[in-house]
Image (cartoon, rainbow, N blue to C red):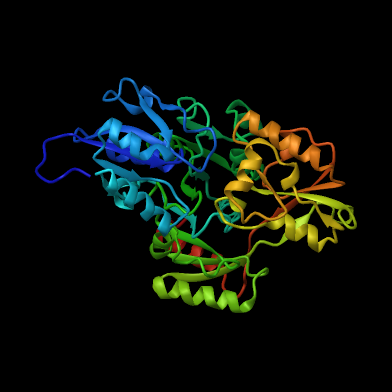
């Protein structure tokens, strides 16, 4: 934000988590002579708060790059760098969390800024369908995969642009084109990245991701005639969508207006998709429908489910089972457990092993940071040392069977002595409120073949 009539450069700190923060910088501040970003902060993701945003990405106004510090040091950063504005740029946090950060910024004398979609969304020359969500773990990616396959079967050339997860060397991750498992290896993708990219690649869809979304968008446009934005957390899209589908979790009907920016995303939606209806009571589905209609009466309503299947359910029956769940879903997503726990229980596991006594290092810290976690192990693997901690924790648990409900093949990344049974889930639309009908209406109007 630049004050009207001011010819003085404002000094800013951007609060982030290695994703939207970098995009906000590149779209709003990198080439803005009225603003100087003196620091980024980082949170949510371990090991990303002792880096520097590289000069080669920051542009000529930042020959030394931009330092990244822990968010916990916000007040000291504001004092040391004489910051006049604090810009909030990450997602899936309670509204109160945002305002606590605002209070800290205001107490330090800074103006608190929430950048909006019009300032940060890029315009594509291709039609764009965005899949976003009210909360992490609502099932965005299965919906994006279902949509990509459906479009491809209709003769479309499809590319997926994935919300960023640049947790490694930022300069190497400027523009990533991922079409094969070898590409994942070459890119040194973390377990969290593989969870998102592997299932798309297995279906033959090329994924674009990285740091510089202007360059990423142009690369994707060159290969496809329609783009899918596969969102992360509950963030709004980086690319302006022609059709915006927002996924709501029927297992969390009370979280329509509780988190940022999920509430804003729901209010932006063209289609509100109520997901996981097969696992939720009918009363909760009805409650969620009413709450969604109350904040966005113009959006179409669709419904669907994510039925879970085990590769070998018989192998789980009567055994001591360790359940590995998708990390973000059960950490900052707020779920006590996920699809793996439900599948193991349904298959007749004799015992779900509590991983907490066996957790080490950052995994133990995760249980302390997220006390809502149940008897499941979050699949955290943001760096090699954390992958080693995950492997040692699994070994210490000494399970008969490991049920793994992450979309990535964890056993391909770390050694696991116990037999691993994967839990899989794909989106299935409700024939009484199908998503496909609403998407087809959009395609007929906007992108006729």
**Residue sitting at x 84%, y 45%:** 399
Q: Is residue 274 above or below residue 422?
A: below
Say which of 333 and 58 sits in front. 333
Q: Residue furthest top?
A: 63
**Residue sitting at x 80%, y 36%:** 416
Say which of 143 and 395 sits in front. 395
Task: Using residue 204 as the reference point, say whether residue 340 is left or right of it.
Answer: right
Q: Residue furthest left?
A: 5
- Please identify the quadrant where the N terminus is shown: top left
- Number of numbered discs on residues: 0
**Residue sitting at x 67%, y 33%:** 387
Say which of 209 and 286 sits in front. 286
Q: Is residue 168 above or below residue 84?
A: above
Q: Is residue 361 above or below residue 260?
A: above
Task: Using residue 324 as the reference point, say whether residue 48 is left or right of it.
Answer: left
**Residue sitting at x 52%, y 73%:** 288
Task: Using residue 187 as the reference point, say whether residue 122 is left or right of it.
Answer: left
Q: Residue 200: tell me if it is visible.
A: no
Residue 411, position as x, y percentages in the image: 76, 37
Q: Residue 254: tell me if it is visible.
A: yes
Residue 242, position as x, y percentages in the image: 39, 56
- The quarter holding residue 249 reads bottom right
Residue 409, position as x, y percentages in the image: 72, 40
Residue 292, position as x, y percentages in the image: 46, 71
């Amino acid at each position: 934000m630049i004050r009207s009539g001011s010819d003085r450069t404002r000094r800013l700190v951007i609060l982030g988590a290695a994703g939207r923060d970098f995009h906000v910088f590149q779209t709003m501040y990198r080439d803005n002579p009225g603003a100087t970003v003196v620091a980024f902060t980082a949170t949510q993701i371990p090991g990303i708060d002792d880096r520097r945003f590289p000069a080669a990405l920051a542009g000529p106004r930042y020959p030394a790059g931009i330092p990244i510090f822990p968010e916990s040091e916000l007040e000291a950063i504001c004092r040391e760098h004489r910051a006049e504005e604090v810009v909030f740029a990450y997602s899936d946090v309670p509204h109160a969390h945002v305002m606590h950060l605002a209070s800290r910024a205001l107490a330090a004398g800074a103006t608190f800024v929430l950048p909006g979609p019009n300032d940060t969304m890029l315009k594509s020359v291709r039609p764009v369908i965005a899949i976003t969500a009210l909360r992490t773990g609502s099932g965005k990616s299965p919906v994006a995969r279902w949509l990509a396959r459906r479009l491809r079967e209709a003769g479309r050339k499809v590319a997926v642009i994935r919300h960023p997860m640049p947790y490694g060397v930022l300069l190497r991750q400027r523009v990533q084109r991922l079409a094969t498992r070898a590409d994942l290896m070459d890119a040194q993708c973390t377990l969290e990245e593989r969870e998102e990219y592997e299932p798309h690649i297995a279906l033959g869809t090329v994924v674009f991701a990285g740091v510089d979304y202007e360059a990423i968008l142009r690369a994707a446009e060159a290969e496809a005639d329609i783009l899918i934005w596969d969102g992360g957390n509950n963030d709004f899209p980086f690319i302006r969508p022609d059709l915006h589908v927002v996924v709501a979790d029927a297992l969390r009907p009370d979280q329509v207006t509780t988190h940022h920016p999920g509430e804003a995303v729901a209010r932006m939606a063209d289609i509100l998709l109520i997901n996981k209806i097969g696992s939720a009571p009918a009363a909760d589905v009805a409650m969620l429908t009413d709450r969604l209609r109350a904040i966005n009466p113009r959006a179409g309503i669709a419904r669907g489910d994510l039925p879970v299947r085990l590769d070998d359910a018989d192998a789980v029956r009567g055994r001591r089972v360790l359940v590995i769940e998708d990390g973000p879903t059960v950490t900052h997503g707020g779920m006590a457990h996920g699809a793996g726990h439900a599948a193991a229980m349904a298959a007749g596991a004799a015992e779900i092993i509590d991983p907490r006594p066996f957790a080490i290092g950052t995994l133990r810290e995760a249980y302390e940071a997220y006390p809502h976690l149940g008897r499941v192990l979050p699949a955290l693997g943001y760096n090699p040392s954390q992958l080693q901690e995950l492997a040692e924790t699994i070994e210490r648990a000494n399970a008969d069977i490991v049920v793994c409900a992450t979309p990535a093949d964890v056993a391909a990344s770390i050694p696991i002595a116990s037999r691993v049974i994967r839990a899989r889930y794909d989106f299935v639309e409700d024939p009484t409120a199908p998503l496909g009908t609403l998407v087809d209406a959009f395609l007929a109007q906007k992108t006729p073949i």
